[in-house]
Image (spheres, grey):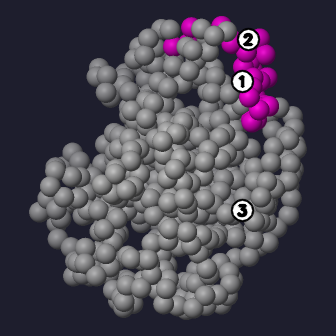
Amino acid sequence: MVRMLPIIAVLIGVCVAAHAHGAAERGTILSPKALQEIAQVVEEIDHIEAATLARLPTAPDNQVQQLELLGKAMLYDKQLSVNRNEACAFCHMPETGFTGPLSELNETTGAYPGSVRTRFSNRKPQTHSYAALSPVLHYNPGQGDLVGGNFWDMRATGRRLGNPAAEQAEGPPTNPVEMALPDAACAVYRASQRPYRGLFELLWGPQAFAIKWPEDVERVCDTPGPPPEGTLPVRLDPADRGRTNTTFDQMAQSIASYEASAEVTSFTSKYDAVQAGKAKFTPQEQLGYDLFRGKAQCNTCHRDGGPGEDPLFTDFTASNIGTPANPRLPYYAEQRTDALGYVANPAGPSYVDPGVAGFLAERNLLSHPSSVDARWRKLEPGVTGRFQVPTLRNVDKRPYPAFVKAYGHNGYFRSLKEIVHFYNTRDVLPRCQAGDPGEGTTCWPAPELTANMNTSRVGRLGLSDADEDALVSFMRTLSDGYFSRDSQ
């Protein structure tokens, strides 16, 4: 098993990073290996973006495909971040199933740096694949539960735009620890200068960028957020602000269209081929599937579908599986005011992630793309510590066998075997401290939060080591790319 590292091993010093607006800042040092991987991913993003933009002159004569092309161009566009260095895709690349593509960060920090490279999020990146199929967040009184939305804490509800994936796309651009623009209007301004502007206007209308930008817009948009509380730093009159808000919504809807496309949500795994009668599981994979649907009870939350239901391997609810805190997260050391005047984590090392409850209590409004339905606030005690059940599709998709993927909302687990072992033994093995030699094998640290912890289907499954391996083998059949859609 991969063992925990003390946070000091990750936060090994300070660095000074220059930014576009001339400020400097101290923060976490990224290892040479991490910097090398970041450079490789950025180069790959540039290559994909260039190839996408090259298709603009011969865009398909079909509105749906045009929307997908436009959304892809924006998903891979680094110019939409404050320092023009981070695209949405930086945390969501195809070779890993549209989640974190940096093996070194998955193994060490768990979370990813934002456009301001010394600021890190408090959670690992989720996958974009199949996220567009999540329902609008709603309360199901029969289940007594919230269902749907996007993000680990469901905060992209979809209630305003009718599409959680679109509202999710509106979160990172102005999140100070992600793309860090000080105003959503800056994303619209930057998009107005990009080669895909013509396609955007063709699809959404010439009014999209008919906005009188103030003379200082460049300076304002080159300054990392957040802005002073309660302010919108790009000074626009009410009509232009309204136009800007609408265009920002349309940008997000375009990105969501790409995420719903066959390129991202393809249903091309070996599992799909088996269900179509065009492939067969190996004996170990079949044992794993039988355990998945039986003794291991995985199918209760990671549903593989029913009549008229796509096998999405999630029920879109939230659960607290008792994941330990991940002390490798740089977020725990972000309690000091940075050189730009921002404190990402005032609680410092004592921070505890409240899960869905943090959204309902409207904590950290800077990262909330959707409003809270006031009628849901009474649900807060029952969702404390709970995080959205992720799809298992592409759960093991990786560019090469030794690539490390992180699992859990905070990236605590670093292999499928490890998280399966946790589900199986959480309540069987003794407790230990982070960094104990037996951690992850013969003992587990205490859960970060015990409130609302799932004890009926997690913690004491009675599986053998061979059973755990079989479950891992089955879940590896959920990686897309086993066959081409064009061949079916």
Q: Residue at x 11, y 63 (%)?
A: 277
Residue marked by disc 1 = 232
Are there few (<14), some (14-19), or many (20+) residues within 10 Å of tag 1? some
Find out whether residue 210 is within the magenta segment.
yes
Q: In the visual, does 153 lie left or right of 432?
A: left
Secondary structure of the residue carrying numbered label 1? loop
Q: In the visual, does 36 lie left or right of 370?
A: right
Tell me where residue 46 sits by quadrant.
top right
Q: Residue at x 86, y 48 (%)?
A: 337
In-front residue for pair 174/36: 174
Q: Amino acid at mark 2?
A: Pro
The answer to whether residue 378 shows anywhere in this view is yes
Up/down of 105 relative to 63, above or below: below
Secondary structure of the residue carrying numbered label 2? loop
The earlier-in-sequence mark between 2 and 1 is 2
In-front residue for pair 411/460: 460
Tell me where residue 279 sits by quadrant.
bottom left
Q: Amino acid at mark 3?
A: Tyr
Up/down of 296 relative to 384, above or below: below
The earlier-in-sequence mark between 2 and 3 is 2
